[in-house]
Image (cartoon, rainbow, N blue to C red):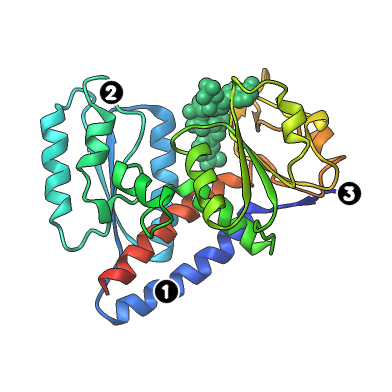
Amino acid sequence: MVDLLDGKKAAQLADQEFSQRINDLKLMGITPGLAVILIGNDSASQVYVRNKKRRAQKVGINYQLFHLAENITQTAVLQLINKLNHDPEIDGIMVQMPVPPQIDAAKVMNAIAVDKDVDGFSFDNIGRLWSNNSGNFPATPRGIIRLLQQYEISVAQKHVVVVGRSNIVGRPMAGLLLNADATVTMAHSKTPNLAALTKQADILIVAIGQAEFITADYVKPQSVVIDVGMNHDVTGKLVGDVDFSSVSQVASMLTPVPGGVGPMTITGLLEQVIILAEKRA
Ligand code: NDP
């Protein structure tokens, strides 16, 4: 019988810890501040931003949303970032992706002050991650590391296979794992004979955006499987990248979708904001 890695429960536990840490900060006169810049009216982005607001406010973070018009100029966005960079009440700044075509996402992300770049998408923070220096790192991989820790699953000395090489999940995930002494293999859409690789994984992390792609044939018996995917199947139901019904027969531990990595992504973001406020203190 597979054990579920319950992200909802882990996120609630984390929120309790965060509330306590924020109370301690408030006693020192500091409230962690998070500025979220949302450009345009992408409906999925509006849902993500709302979820962040709810969780951030619940633990006591000063959450500020800057909702900008779809046709805003890049200059205006850069001006806002510059203002927030100099705002002493703001510890973290993030721009919700995707942005409209007139906005150069890389330019915008690199305009955020390195220490306030809460998503860790700037080239500086990517460099810090890959040189194993302290910095800000992306929310989803942070959340996954925390989920594994909460279930006392050590990655050190384990062979972890990460499928997917995006800048927001796969690559930073591999960096964090490497820094935590895992032996890491990265795979992607051009990897030949994927199943032969994934079957060697003690821990398999899948972030490919392909509904229920990873079946039991890809999984080593008794391994731990982390499903990052969020897809809709033909009936519109939210499903992961992992075929839950077959993989749950083989793996020892598995994240459900929903209720696995999703809640832990916001946990990763909130934790990063709190760490930055603690540095300010
Ligand atoms: P991207 O589309 O940016 O990247 C997908 C990656 O998967 C690419 O590297 C691609 O390879 C690889 N890939 C695609 N198909 C295959 C395949 N058949 N075999 C092996 N590799 C493949 O996706 P993201 O990383 O942004 O997101 C991945 C999934 O995770 C999505 O479902 C997304 O919704 C979800 N997600 C969930 C989050 C959460 O909080 N739960 C947070 C972020 C994302 P190549 O580079 O060669 O094209």
Most distant residue in the bottom direction? 27
Disc 3 residue crowd, few under 14, some 14–19, many 20+, Cα 10 Å: few
Q: In the rendered image, which quarter contains the C terminus?
A: bottom left
Residue under numbered circle 3: 1
- Compared to residue 56, the image places residue 103 above or below, namely above
- CA distance separating discs 1 and 2: 36 Å
* Residue occupying image coordinates x 23% and y 36%: 108
In this rendering, would 164 be left or right of 22? right
**Splitting the image into 4 quarters, where does residue 77 fall?**
top left
Q: Amino acid at mark 3?
A: Met
For label 1, the SS is helix
Q: Earlier in the sequence, mark 3 or mark 2?
A: 3
* Residue occupying image coordinates x 20% and y 63%: 89
Near-viewer residue (241 or 32): 241
- CA distance separating discs 3 and 2: 46 Å
Q: Amino acid at mark 1?
A: Arg
Q: Amino acid at mark 2?
A: Pro
The x, y position of residue 245, in whole percent, is 82, 34
Image disc number at residue 100: 2
**Splitting the image into 4 quarters, where does residue 246 fall?**
top right
- CA distance separating discs 3 and 1: 37 Å
In this rendering, would 36 be left or right of 203? left
Q: Earlier in the sequence, mark 3 or mark 1?
A: 3
Residue under numbered circle 1: 21
Q: Earlier in the sequence, mark 1 or mark 2?
A: 1
Near-viewer residue (4 or 198): 198
